Image (cartoon, rainbow, N blue to C red):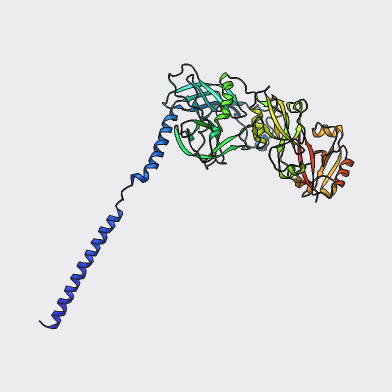
Amino acid sequence: MNKAKVRAIGVALGLAVFVAVGMTLMIGAESGSEQAMKPGPIDANVIAPAEQLGRAYAMVAAHVKPCVVSVYSEKVIKFTEPEFSFPFGDDFFRQFFGNQFGTQQQPQLHQREFRGRQEGMGSGMILDKEGHILTNYHVVKDVDDIKVQLADKHTFEAEIVGTDPKTDVAVIKIKGHVPDELPTITLGDSDAMEVGDLVMAIGAPFGLQQTVTKGIISATGRSNVGIADYEDFLQTDAPINPGNSGGPLVNMRGEVIGMNTAIATGIGRFEGVGFSIPSNMIKTMLPKLLKGEKIVRGQLGVVIQEMTKDLAGQFGLSGVKGVLVSQVNKGSAADKAGIKVGDVIVRYDDHDVQDVRHLRDLVAATTPGTKVKIEISRGGKEETLTATIGTQASEIVAAAPSAQGADVVSKLGLSVETLTPEIAKQLGVDVDKGVAITDVGEGSLASLAGLQKGDVIVEADHQSVASADDLQQVLARAKDKDNVLLLVKRQSESLFVVMQMK
């Protein structure tokens, strides 16, 4: 065999070996890839806690869902519009046809009345076997017809029994025959809830009945949300959307600890901030609401404002605990108890006062005629007074928060004049002595303090001022101070303002 043939045979054998090895490697690679794509076994011990939590959610949902109803409301709306009118008016018509119709009065356009139905939807929860249902006031406000659909799809007409617009709470009742053995909710202790506790929300968001969502308590005691007059909301990130209003927020024992009421969004979608009325607030009102009685709230008769570091310094206090009394209404429970302007209320009926909202809610929840102990700080000394709470005719009002501030004299940015009966009447203030602010310079110390045109200064640096000269003299003596305290009357309210002097 010559050398050429030997080389050819060698090359052929080499290629065969290369292809065989390559195919073996490819088969091995494919085999390894198939093994890599195969799911590995799930360790039951690892997922056991998750499964247990899932079963807990399912159990709570199954326990509460039968008690949750969908609330449908309808309202008849009326509107009118003319049957016909010239699109450009009579003048345009006359340009083409002249005054051939003379000066006779043109036919009157008749107004046609139309009626339509405005529909709404929310949620509710069954309170008792008699068919009483708890929901939000705004769900049934000013409606003509109410229907409720139970979890088993049966629908019934309902009627309003009791409402409290100030907290956005309402009780409705199934009309006529009430189904036997209605499932009912259990109201839990909302005060026991802490930030981070697991909760579930149930309702009909966007009309999707019996929807369950979960989350945690994000915050407690939320106020100044702008939803109701009295606010002490539980905040949650459990998804709440339009249609959830009136539905329950429940803890992991299946107890209702809140009624879902609102979401913090400008476009009507869930963004992780929902608000629920705490169950303990609802409990205090239920006995009267179930009887259709009006909710009567207690009144102390004061105007109060938040304590700040600057205000605390002016009153010789070491901290900002409690709320500052800026006005005491004559003849009120506070007046009879001996509470004075400048007192700091630090404790009410065994409760440490946290802020304006907290005291307002404590007083409102007190039955009129009840005697309560009120601990105040006056001149750095603490005293305990006894007040007999009155009946609320108007709300306890929180004075506007004071800003870092100024006072009077032109260099501070103020123009003033001595208060007269005519000026007092014009400004709507009920004081007969003081100094009226007629102008506040833009960007001045007075404006930075929050003083406004129309305010009446009745005290400066803890001294009464009856005229513009009095004010000038008091401020002249205080010119070397860092700040002074002013007591200002703003229409029907009083408030303290700390004003920087330099």
Residue 310, quarter of picture: top right
Residue 350 falls in image quadrant: top right
**Count the marks: how many?**
0
For the point 52% across and 42% down, the residue is 272
In the rendering, at what x and y percent does residue 42 appear? 33, 47
Q: Residue furthest top?
A: 177
Front-lying residue, 112 or 278: 278
Left or right: where does residue 338 sit relative to residue 115?
right
Specify whether 164 is left or right of 196.
right
- Where residue 314 appears, as percent x and y from the top left, is 77, 43
Is 257 drawn above or below residue 315 in the view shown? above
User: Is residue 445 in sight in this rendering?
Assistant: yes
Which residue occupies the foreground of this view, 431 or 461?
Answer: 461
Q: Is residue 93 visible?
A: no
Q: Position of residue 40 (x, y in %)?
A: 31, 50
Image quarter of residue 385? top right
Task: Give the residue at the far left of this rendering.
Answer: 1
Q: Is residue 262 above or below residue 162?
A: below
Residue furthest to the right in view is 469
Nearest the eye: 40 or 171: 40
| Residue at (45% x, 35% y) in the render | 212
Q: Is residue 382 left or right of residue 221?
A: right
In the rendered image, residue 292, in percent from the top left (x then y), is placed at 58, 19
The foreground one among 114 and 95 is: 114
Point out the image quarter for the N terminus. bottom left
Residue at the extreme bottom? 2
